[in-house]
Structure formats: structure tokens, C-alpha cells
Amino acid sequence: MNETFFFREQNQLKAFSDEILPEIRETKKEKKRLRIWSAGCSTGEEPYTIAMLILEYGRLQGWDIDILGSDINQRVLTAARRGVYRKNSFRTAEQYFRQKYFIEEDGSFVISEDVKRLVSFSCLNLLDPFKVKFMGQMDVIFCRNVLIYFDHAARKKVADNFFDNLVEGGYLLLGHAESLMNISTSFALKHLKSDMVYQKPVRQGVFSKCETR
């Protein structure tokens, strides 16, 4: 269940970088706050990948950026906080990223502080509605290759919780083997150039993403 690596499912990441981030930059240019949740983050490759993509995007200087990684497993969270990885974690990552954002030490690769400072980690059970609500409002939620381990009732519960956690117009990105078919009709399926993602609809009369904190 803890199988993960940097830059997994690259079409989806391209959609995030090329289309979702520019949209958020435009719709939140007054607030200048970006909150992203990596749910089921395992050893941290996914939230650190998101942080690297944001740094590469380079148009959010001066923004308050929070990338939150959560998992139910304390062991993998300890590894995520350390930010030390072996070559196997880079199986689909371009060498450029490894050279720019990591320091090689004794055959391992240590994530740079520029990336690390954008990411925090917490232990969280996705089926605990109180702790999930405490996460607050998110612009984007990544929950990739996690729901496949849940039964139908649990998937529905998690999807409902994610819907409540997203700002209007916010995005939910699932793994390519997952969908919300027969689970939730609350989200809209949005076709981007590189991939399909789920979006929380904006209510009529609401002209930009609104946050209720």
C-alpha cells in the first residue's frame, strides 16, 4: 500500500502545473493563499513532487503556500519528514529535478530545504470526520491510489469529506485506476488538456473561489 515514487502519473501532474496552478493564481490573486492536501502521502514523494512543481511554476512568489501530507501510518510519516530517498524513488523523475532539489549523501538523496519548508505532515485517518474537518479548506486534494483499498461505503464517506474540505471550484485528483462512478455525484468531471480531474462546482452567483474559515 505504501508503493510510491516521485512524479507518478505525469499527465495528471502536467494538468496540475499547466492548467490548475495558473487558474488558481488568477482566481486567488487577492488572497494569495494556496492550500493543497496530499491524502495518503506515504513516504512523502507525492507532496514533495507537488512542492517542486510549484517552485518550477515560479509565479507564486509572496504567496502563503501550505502543502499538507497525511497518512495513517506513523512509520511512513517519519520517513517523509526525514526526506531521504534512494534511487528507486526517482524511477520516472527527470534527472534535472534530482540535481536541482536534492543533495546526494552516501548513495541517498536528501530533499532540499526549499522544498521541505513548503510541506508538513500529520497522522490522519481519512474515515475520521472530525480530524478531516480540522484540515480546513483546500484548493486541491490529491488522493491517488488510496481509495482502491477501501470498500464502497468507505469510499463514499471519504469522497463526501473531500467535497466538504474543498473550496468552491477546488480540484480532487484521484489515481488513474480510480473514479467516483457510483460513489459521488457531487463533483463535476472536468476535461483538461492533459487529463481528466474532478472539480467541486461553483454555485450560481459565486464569481470566484470563496473560503469559509
Image (spheres, rainbow, N blue to C red):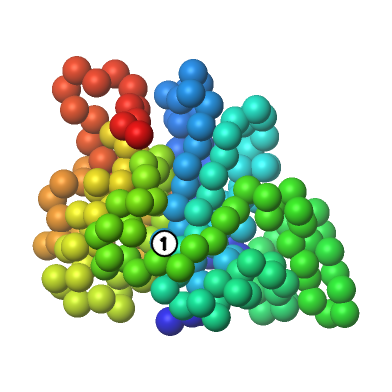
Relative to residue 124, is residue 27 depicted above or below?
Answer: above
Compared with residue 45, is residue 149 higher up or lower down, i.e. above or below? below
> Vertical placement of 22 versus 83: above or below?
above
Near-viewer residue (37 or 57): 37
Q: Is residue 106 visible?
A: yes
Q: Which of 186 and 15 is in front in this view?
A: 186
- 125 lies above or below 212: below
Q: Position of residue 5 (x, y in %)?
A: 58, 71
User: Residue at coordinates 77% horizontally, 57% vertically from top-left?
Assistant: 112
The residue positioned 25% from the left and 76% from the top of the image is: 150
Residue 19 lies, in percent from the top left, at 47, 37
Q: Would you call the spot at circle 1 few (<14 residues within 10 Å), some (14-19), or many (20 or more)?
A: many
The N terminus, quarter of image: bottom left
Compare residues 125 and 1 and report the one nearer the observer.
Answer: 125
Query: Quarter-wise, where is residue 46 in the image?
Result: bottom right
Label 1 is placed on what type of residue?
Ala
The residue labelled by disc 1 is 39
State left or right for residue 54 relative to residue 32. Answer: right
Which residue corresponds to the image point at 45% horizontal and 38% vertical from the top-left?
Answer: 20
